[in-house]
Image (spheres, rainbow, N blue to C red):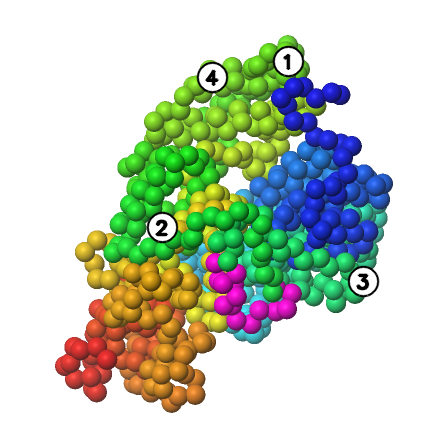
Amino acid sequence: MPNVAGVVRPDRERDPLAGLDPEQRAAAGAPRGPVCVLAGAGTGKTRTITHRIAHLVRAGHVSANQVLAVTFTARAAGELRDRLRRLGVEGAQARTFHAAALRQLRYFWPRVVGDTPWELLDHKIRLVGRAAATLDLPTEVEVVRDLAGEIEWAKASLVGPEDYPAVAARRGRDVGHPAEKVAELYRTYERAKNDRRLLDFDDLLLHTTAAVEEHRSVADEFRERYRCFVVDEYQDVTPAQQRLLDAWLGGRDDVTVVGDANQTIYSFGGASPRPLLDFTRRYPDATVVRLERDYRSSPQVVALANRVIGAARGRPAGSRLTLVGQRPDGPEPAFSEHPDEEAEAAAVAARVDELIGAGTDAGEIAVLFRVNAQSEAYEKALSERDVPYVVRGGERFFARTEIRRAMAALRTAAARPEEGSAPASGAGEGDGLVRVVREVLSREGLTARAPSGGAARERWNGLRALLDLAEDLAATSDNATLARYVAELEQRASAQHPPEVGGVTLASLHAAKGLEWDAVFLVGLADGTVPIQHADTDEAIEEERRLFYVGVTRAREHLSLSWSLARTPGRRAHRRRSRFLQGLVPDDHPASRVRGRRGGGAPKPVCRVCGAPLLSTMDVKLGRCGRCPADVDTDLLARLQEWRRERARELNVPPFVVFTDATLSAIAEQRPTDESALVSIAGIGATKVERFGGEVLAVVRSSPDQGDTSVGR
């Protein structure tokens, strides 16, 4: 079918290997069999794997409907489907692990169980809370959420209730309750769930694996249908997902995995880069390709990213990718220090406004933070400047009232023969699919011009995103009828894969994984937030560093990094900039001047005994080298532990939420007697000082050898 003028159609005759760089071409054109692609951030991994699928299909090595590609988010799966469609590959499956498992379980359930399918449990919090109540465990939402997370970790790690205590002890798991009690909660939850004939999301993987492993007919039918597998983001695979993949493969080796150990940021949920790093041990004949040409970010951003990850300790050989920027030069990353969070947010909003005024689309700007609670200050600051924004992770797109109404209207229009079969385009501009969708959405509130801001602007952005999707479908499909467009919307709603919505993105660093923007603001980069307060082991600190690296590599051109010295205006400047910024902030930057303990902190922590540089997390926390003698006041440590027990009981939280053991040891060793000295201990941020500082200092001052002095050490 000839292309319509001005409309780009997928070229189904073009060689899928054309236009790839040498490394991408080597990966995409590798023969059937095991392939491992070590792909750095921005190196075109999605392009590579979709072109590999297209190459295998076009060359006749496999049929499209025999391909199963799995990834970790609905958005990423949707992107895979969109790109395969543009390449003319119809029929290949691209889903998340859980969505693929759910589809298979529903299909095979009558054969392996033989009765009505069990209902899927969307949220386990309520059921875990009921189980906790029967065992006299705390039932506050925060505690129950932690306990539910621990059950999820156990199931993802293939650890049952009977094995949990031993495994938890071996791996240092601590949720503030005895492991035996957590195991009993786990057992009670599973019993209650099964009695109600419910499945949680973890069960989807486990039950599908069991169906394939234990039923020969199921395994034979599945393996006959799917013969080629692709796994994206392989560094984040859990033991449960790996076992399901093994069941799918059934001893075959036609599998392509793609990942980057430098972006492993979900180990708290059971993920591990070990399967990626050990891939060649399992498949000695595997083709291994390293993608290091960064097409996303400017050389200046790439250079900073390499320095961030280059400072990591204990990096395995398979993770040592060095990105090489391929884009033209851009501005140097900007660093800024602010007196408090309000001032930081105001400065970021002002800079965002400048970028938009200079021509950067609001949808190409993101403000990224470590925890969702930081979002509020930026929502307020952007609203004051009438800048549209979208909070990623907020209300689901397809659950919004205006979107539900618009989809209902589109379904009604699609049911009318004269509109449902409308072609993608016609002789004049505005004809066909796009014209019909625009007319329907205009009746639902879509105007030619966007409202100035607020809730009206948010509703308009959502409707505009629906129209953008229609325009995209019309430009990339030969059969873009209204009926097909509505079917695409239904599929996206089912998979929770919303279209892109206009506005500055506000998101956590975890939620930003897999996304990119022209301009990125990394905010709140203070110790205690980045790295997070409860990261008190070397492994946890390194994961926080990788999370910071993920944030840096989201930026294409503009990258701004900022921190504040206090939480609220008028409070003491207790905070220090993140240790991850050491060596990154230019020497001539005002924030690089050596300050006292109330300021940004010394660039490199040194031992308070011998003056040598401190390297390990524990040494930094204690303020001394491991080889230097300890000076712990054991009586003070005992009093601090007793105070923590009482405080945790009052707050109904695990003791480590108040302060970790390592932090208490550091306090008992350094014996701070004012807030400035207290905040100088690594891991104690402004929030902890504001909440517990006075009480801790009172305990320290009660020590016999402290006397009445109030001068810091």
Residue range (magenta)? 304-319
Q: Which mark is residue 285?
A: 3
- Circle 3: element type: loop
- The quadrant of the rendering that contains the N terminus is top right
Q: Quadrant of residue 672?
A: bottom left
Q: CA distance from mark 1 to mark 2?
A: 49 Å
Can residue 470 be spotted in the picture?
Answer: yes
State whether residue 369 is above or below residue 401: below
- Circle 2: element type: helix
Q: CA distance from mark 3 to mark 4?
A: 58 Å
Q: CA distance from mark 1 to mark 3?
A: 53 Å
Helix, strand or loop: magenta stretch: helix
Can residue 182 be spotted in the picture?
Answer: no
Residue bearing mark 1? 426
Q: Which mark is residue 374?
A: 2
Q: Which is more N-terminal, label 1 or label 4?
A: 1
Q: Which is more N-terminal, label 4 or label 3?
A: 3
The residue most toward the front is: 329
* 309 inside magenta stretch: yes
Residues 311 and 510: in front is 311
Q: CA distance from mark 3 to mark 2?
A: 48 Å
Q: Nearer the viewer, mark 3 or mark 2?
A: 3
Q: Which is more N-terminal, label 2 or label 3?
A: 3
Image marks 1 and 3: residues in contact by CB distance under 8 Å: no
